[in-house]
Image (cartoon, rainbow, N blue to C red):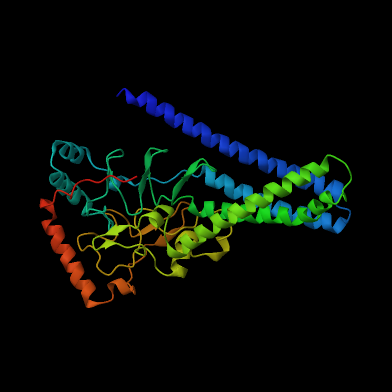
Amino acid sequence: SSPQEPHSKLKKCDILITYCMFTIQLTLLVCSRAYTSHCELPIKSMTNVGEKVVCLICYHMFFIMFVWSYWKSIFTMPMNPSKEFHLSYADREQLEREERGEAQQEVLRRVAKDLPIYTRTMSGAIRYCDRCQLVKPDRCHHCSVCDKCILKMDHHCPWVNNCVGFSNYKFFLLFLAYSLLYCLFITATDLQYFIKFWTNGLPDTQAKFHIMFLFFAAAMFSVSLSSLFGYHCWLVSKNRSTLEAFRAPAFRHGTDKNGFSLGFSKNLRQVFGDEKKYWLLPIFTSLGDGCAFPTCLVNQDPEQPSTPAGHNPTTKNIEGHPFPAKPLRESQSHLLGSAQSWTEAAGDEQKDKLGMNNPAMNIENET
């Protein structure tokens, strides 16, 4: 092992400890809210019995859904690329023997020709991870914290101490939604007692300090969660990940920030599934296998198949429910709707044929 490995492992350990502290702090804050909402508000401060019953029922409903989605976001393991994307021993040996970038790229092109890969690096090369020694599927990225490639990686979240990707992105969205509803409910029910606190309308007990802290914490979290949840709703409507929002995916014809967008309805179903009755539950219903995604591009790479070699066209999701592979549809994008676009696409193909002599066509690793 290299002398830098112990330092690298120690650094990763420190990062994990920091993320765990974030998670513990959030858990303690939730427990504090639970105590105040169970004891201080309904039992000691509220006088109307009906108000107490409604408050406790609504609170428990939001609290259970919040904890359920939070639990699923934390403990759902991120999915990694299937074995079809990993290089064989012979291919790895050949790749290591080649010293020139164009020769290495030729090896990767041969490996990727039977894989449903349509994205490239910014220089037009095959996306390859030298850490995991695999050809990256579309929308897959290497997480430096987890030290592995994550399918449809969105980001690594410290609040759930986990990588948010294809397997748990729906759970993360529901976690944000129920967290926001939870905080808004507490802020709304606590407001009148918070006002009484400043007008000396509450009895001089310890409960008044719990109520004051609860209101400030819930109100601040409501503001931050509303912006974060709104941003991810916008990402879902555009069928983008956080990484793709900052850097548009590159295809054969160039970068296209709307390359995976199929329209609002289909974009929504890719994350939440076809059965609407499961949309609000932290149950995996996302479409696909995380390795291949339908695109809205007309000029698909003719050398690439729509499913990996050996894959059954009918795959299964995590819960075991079968679903058909999604077909590629023709684009209505104005970027590809003219004869000029087809001419540019043909020009790109000619450039790819001549790209082996271009020193920029090398293996480009992305994080």
> Which quarter of the image is occupied by the N terminus?
top left
| Residue shown at the point (34%, 47%) measured from the top left | 82
The foreground one among 89 and 243 is 243
| Residue shown at the point (49%, 62%) measured from the top left | 234
User: Is residue 289 at least partly visible in the picture?
Assistant: no
| Residue shown at the point (79%, 58%) measured from the top left | 54
> Which quarter of the image is occupied by the C terminus?
top left
Above or below, 270 relative to 8: below
Q: Position of residue 245 (x, y in %)?
A: 41, 57
Q: Position of residue 43 (x, y in %)?
A: 85, 47
Residue 214 is left or right of residue 179, and the answer is right
The quadrant where residue 146 appears: top left
Residue 207 is left or right of residue 280, and the answer is right
Q: Position of residue 241 (x, y in %)?
A: 42, 55
Q: Position of residue 257 (x, y in %)?
A: 36, 62
The quadrant where residue 9 appears: top left
| Residue shown at the point (49%, 42%) measured from the top left | 162
User: Is residue 181 at least partly visible in the picture?
Assistant: yes
Residue 350 is left or right of residue 332, and the answer is left
Count all numbered tags in the image, as a single digit: 0
The foreground one among 313 and 127 is 127
